[in-house]
Image (spheres, rainbow, N blue to C red):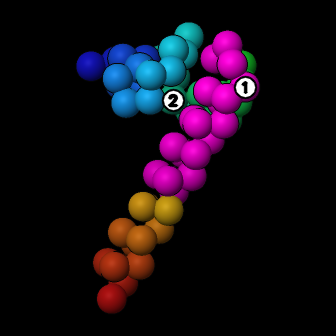
Amino acid sequence: MSIKNFIKILLDIEVNTEDILELRENPKEYVTKVEDAEKLNDLFLLMDLAKRQEVDEDDN
C-alpha cells in the first residue's frame, strides 16, 4: 500500500507525495489545509515517542 493511501485511511488526509521524509520535513507543502499539516506533525511526534520508548525498553 502506498504512503498516500495509508495516510488517507488512517487520518483522512490527502497528501500529494509518496516521499515520507519530505512529508515529515515539511508537511504544509504536501497538504491543502493547515489542520492536516498539524495532524501529520502529531503523527510524526507519536512515531518518535514510540521509537524512543522502544529503545528505552530495549536498554532495560
Q: Could you say where residue 20 lies in the image, as x and y percent from the top left? A: 51, 29
Residue at mark 1: 34
Whether residue 20 is situated above or below residue 41 in the rendered picture: above
Identity, as a three-letter code, of the amino acid under mark 1: Val
* Residue 6 on the magenta span: no
Q: Residue at x 67, y 29 (%)?
A: 35
Place residue 4 in its image quadrant. top left
Give the number of the disc on residue 20. Answer: 2
Q: Position of residue 48 (x, y in %)?
A: 51, 56
- 48 sits to left or right of 24: left
The amino acid type found where label 2 is placed reads: Ile
Could you tell me which residue is drawn at 62 percent across and 41 percent down? 41
Please rate how many residues cluster around mark 1, counting C-alpha atoms within 10 Å: few if below 14, some from 14 to 19, many from 20. Answer: few
Span highlighted in magenta in the image: 30-48
Q: Say what secondary structure mark 1 lies in.
A: helix
Q: Residue 39: x percent and y percent?
A: 58, 36
Q: CA distance from mark 1 to mark 2?
A: 18 Å
**Front position among marks 1 and 2:** 1
